[in-house]
Amino acid sequence: MILKDAKGLHDLALLLSCPGCEIPAPRLLTGEDAPPAGSDEVADDRARAAYRARLDRLDEEITDARAGGDFSRLGRAEDERDELIAELRRAYGLGGRRRRLGDPGERARTTVTARIRDAMHRIEREHPELGRHLSASVACSYRPERPVHWQL
């Protein structure tokens, strides 16, 4: 299989060359660790409390709508809850750590994730079994279910 050169393929090659190693996105992007984070948090404590309160109200609304058989109201509440959770994921990273506006590490993570995802889609089109393997094994590291020897 021959694929057109792409940065995401280089990112994958680096991850595959070191199974089990966590490689930070800024290092994949630039070869260096991330510079200091931006100054302002994406969501401050007040916003976090407001999100939590709205999620609590939505959970109550979902329970009431489900109990009352009001499927239209249930659908709207579940949709809003899903959107709110997606927004929280954008504001808070893994383990609930706060993301910052203008954070170079966050920009690197977003860029590298898109590059790797694109490369894996291209691989899957050409070699579905390999694409599935990579999709199941790659995040910010390569963790295969069983050891694999790669010749890169």
Image (spheres, grey):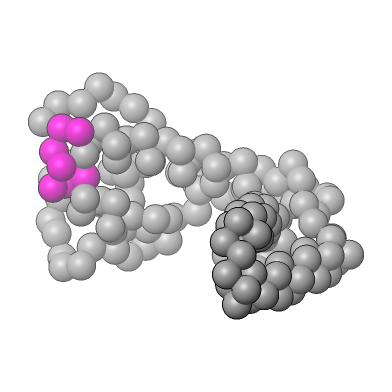
Can residue 53 be found in the magenta stretch?
no
Determine the image quadrant of residue 127. top left
- Give the position of the C terminus as an image quadrant: top left
Q: Is residue 152 left or right of residue 74?
A: left
Q: Residue at x 20, y 26 (%)?
A: 3
From the viewer's side, name the closer residue of 78 and 16.
Answer: 78
Residue 145 drawn at (x, y percent): 20, 67
Does residue 85 show up?
no
Residue positioned most to the top: 4
Q: Is residue 95 above or below residue 106?
A: below
Residue 97 drawn at (x, y percent): 67, 66
Secondary structure predominantly adopted by residues drawn in magenta: helix
Residue positioned most to the right: 46
Q: Is residue 2 above or below residue 90?
A: above
Magenta highlight range = 125-131
Q: Is residue 64 above or below residue 84?
A: below
Q: Residue at x 57, y 50 (%)?
A: 33
